C-alpha cells in the first residue's frame, strides 16, 4: 500500500494542468452503452475509478481499450446487463449503468450500492425516476432489477428532488433512460451540476434531443436510437479547486489551466473572502495568496452552491485562518472523516451536528494521518504542504481514485511529496 511523505511548509509557483473531469467521464462511459458501436472519450482521466468502470463495462459485454487517442468503448454487444456486486461495491458510480441498460436491453440488474465513508448515499430517487418512465423495479437478493414495459419506456413529467436537494447521478440515470423513451420526459428539480450538463451535451451529440441543459427543468424528447460519439469531457473543476486551495494554503501563486472558471463562482467567492487574488485567464485562472488567510463561513449546496467535493480541502485552508469559521455540510451531513485527522496535525476543529467550528491556528504540525475517502485525503495532502515537518499520509489509494498523479503535478510546482510503497 502506498503512502505519501510530505515535507512542509513549501512555497509553490508555476503552472498546473487539470485533467478531464472524473465525474463527467464516469456517466459518459455509461452513456456509451446506449449506442451500438465505438464511442471515444479523448481526454478521459487515467484514474482508478475510471479503470474500475472499464472493468464494469467489460463485464457487461463491451470491449474497452485506451490508446493515445483516448478511451475507446465498443458497445456493439451488450450480452450481460448485470452490475455485479464485486464491482459495484468498489464504486458507487456504477449505479449509472441502470438507466442506459434499461433503455438499451429492456432489463437490467445492478447490485444495490451500499453506504460509503461519506455517508448512506441511498438511490431511492433514481428508482422513483425510472419507475415513472414505466419500469417495473424490485429488489432481488441485494440486486435492483428493473424491467421496461413491453412497448418500451414512456416519457412523462418527473420530480427528482430529495431531502438534500437534487441528485447528480439520479438525474443522469433518468435522462439517459428518457433519451430512448417514447414521447417527452420533463425532469423537474434536475441537478444543474456542470457534469450533468456535460452528459446532456454528449447525449445530444449522440442524437438525443435534450433542452434546458444546465437548468433544473430538463425536457427530453425521446428518439428511436442513438449513435456512438467522440466526446471530450470538461476540465475537472474539483481538481482545479483543490489546486486553488494549494496556492492559498501555501501562500503562493499558481496558474491553473484547462477548466472553466465560470463553473466555480461559489468557490471563487469564498476564496476571495479568504483573501486570495484570482485572475481569470483564457483557459483557467491564476490564484495568489499574499497576506494572511481570513476566516470564512462555508455551506455546501447543490450547484451553483459551494460543492461538497471541496469542503474538506477548504477546511484544511480555514484551519490556518486568523479567526473562526463555520463549515456546514448540507449534502452529506457525515462527510467529516478529515476532522479528526486534521486535529492530529494541530488544527482546532470541533464538530457540532452537520457543522464544524474551525478555530484558526497559527501553524499546522506534521503527523502521521489516515486518508479515509477521496476528498478527505486531498485535504490531508494540502495540510501536509503547509504543516511544519514531514506528514505521512496512509492509504493514498483513496486519492488515486480521483486525482491523476497528484504528487507529480504538485512536485512540478515546488511541493516535496514522496510516494512510497510500504
Ligand atoms: N440522495 C438521496 N436519494 C437518492 C440519491 C441521492 O437521498 O436516490 C441524496 C444523497 O444521499 C445526498 C444528496 O442526495 O445527500 C446528493 O447526492 P447525489 O445523488 O447528487 O450524489 P451522487 O450523484 O451519488 C455525485 C458525485 C459525488 C458528489 C455528489 C454531490 C459522481 C460520480 N459522484 O454523487 O462525487 O459528491 O454528486 O455533488 O458524480 C467525489 O467525486 O468525491 C464524489 C463523492
Image: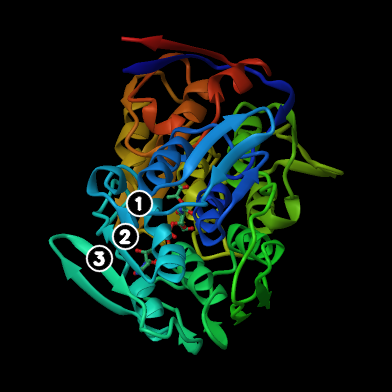
Q: Which mark is residue 144?
A: 3
Q: In this view, does 105 lie to the left or right of 10?
A: left
The image shows residue 389 at horizontal and vertical percentages of 45, 12
Q: Nearer the viewer, mark 2 or mark 1?
A: 1
Dot 2 crowding, Cα within 10 Å, few <14, some 14–19, many 20+: some
Residue placed under numbered mark 1 in the picture: 92
User: Reading the chain from its start, which is encountered first: label 2 or label 1?
Assistant: 1
Q: Is mark 1 on a helix, strand or loop?
A: helix
Q: Nearer the viewer, mark 1 or mark 3?
A: 3
Whether the residues at callouts 2 and 1 have beta carbons within 8 Å, the answer is yes
Residue placed under numbered mark 2 in the picture: 121
Whether the residues at callouts 1 and 3 have beta carbons within 8 Å, the answer is no
Residue depicted at 32% across the width and 32% down the height: 341
Q: Which mark is residue 160?
A: none
Residue depicted at 46% across the width and 62% down the height: 169
Q: Is mark 3 on a helix, strand or loop?
A: strand
Amino acid at each position: 500500500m502506498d503512502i505519501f511523505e510530505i515535507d512542509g511548509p513549501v512555497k509553490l509557483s508555476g503552472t498546473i494542468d487539470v485533467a478531464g473531469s472524473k465525474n463527467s467521464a464516469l456517466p459518459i462511459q455509461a452513456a456509451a452503452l446506449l449506442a451500438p458501436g465505438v464511442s471515444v472519450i479523448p481526454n478521459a482521466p487515467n484514474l482508478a475509478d475510471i479503470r474500475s468502470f472499464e472493468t464494469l463495462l467489460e463485464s457487461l459485454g463491451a470491449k474497452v481499450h485506451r490508446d493515445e487517442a483516448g478511451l475507446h468503448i465498443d458497445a456493439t454487444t451488450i450480452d450481460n446487463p448485470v452490475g455485479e456486486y464485486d464491482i459495484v461495491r468498489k464504486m458507487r458510480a456504477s449505479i449509472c449503468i441502470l438507466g442506459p441498460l434499461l433503455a438499451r436491453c429492456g432489463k437490467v440488474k445492478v447490485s444495490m450500492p451500499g453506504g460509503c465513508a461519506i455517508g448512506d448515499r441511498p438511490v431511492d430517487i433514481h428508482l422513483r425516476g425510472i419507475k415513472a418512465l414505466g419500469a417495473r423495479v424490485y429488489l432481488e437478493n441485494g440486486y435492483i432489477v428493473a424491467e421496461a414495459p413491453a412497448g418500451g419506456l414512456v416519457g412523462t413529467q418527473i420530480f427528482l428532488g430529495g431531502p438534500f436537494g437534487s441528485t447528480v447521478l439520479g438525474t443522469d440515470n433518468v435522462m439517459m433512460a428518457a433519451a430512448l423513451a417514447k414521447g417527452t420526459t420533463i425532469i423537474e428539480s434536475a441537478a444543474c451540476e456542470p457534469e450533468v450538463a456535460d452528459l446532456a451535451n454528449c447525449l445530444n451529440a449522440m442524437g438525443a434531443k435534450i433542452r434546458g441543459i444546465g437548468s433544473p427543468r430538463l425536457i427530453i424528447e425521446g428518439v428511436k436510437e442513438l449513435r456512438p460519439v467522440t466526446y471530450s469531457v470538461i476540465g475537472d473543476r474539483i481538481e482545479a479547486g483543490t489546486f486553488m486551495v494549494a496556492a492559498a494554503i501555501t501562500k503562493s501563486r499558481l496558474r491553473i489551466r484547462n477548466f472553466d472558471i465560470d463553473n466555480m463562482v461559489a468557490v471563487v467567492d469564498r476564496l476571495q473572502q479568504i483573501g486570495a487574488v484570482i485572475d481569470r485567464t483564457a483557459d483557467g485562472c491564476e490564484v495568489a495568496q499574499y497576506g494572511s488567510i481570513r476566516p470564512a463561513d462555508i455551506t455546501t449546496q447543490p450547484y451553483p452552491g459551494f460543492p461538497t467535493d471541496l469542503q474538506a480541502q477548504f477546511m484544511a485552508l480555514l484551519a490556518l485562518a486568523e479567526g473562526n469559521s463555520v463549515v456546514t455540510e448540507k449534502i452529506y451531513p457525515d462527510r467529516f472523516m478529515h476532522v479528526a485527522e486534521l486535529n492530529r496535525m494541530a488544527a482546532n476543529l470541533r464538530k457540532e451536528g452537520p457543522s464544524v467550528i474551525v478555530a484558526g491556528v497559527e501553524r499546522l504540525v506534521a503527523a502521521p494521518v489516515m486518508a479515509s475517502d477521496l476528498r478527505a485525503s486531498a485535504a490531508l495532502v494540502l495540510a501536509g504542504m503547509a504543516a511544519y515537518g514531514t506528514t505521512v499520509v496512509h492509504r493514498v489509494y483513496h486519492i488515486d481514485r480521483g486525482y491523476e498523479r497528484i504528487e507529480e503535478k504538485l512536485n512540478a510546482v515546488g511541493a516535496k511529496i514522496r510516494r512510497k510503497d510500504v
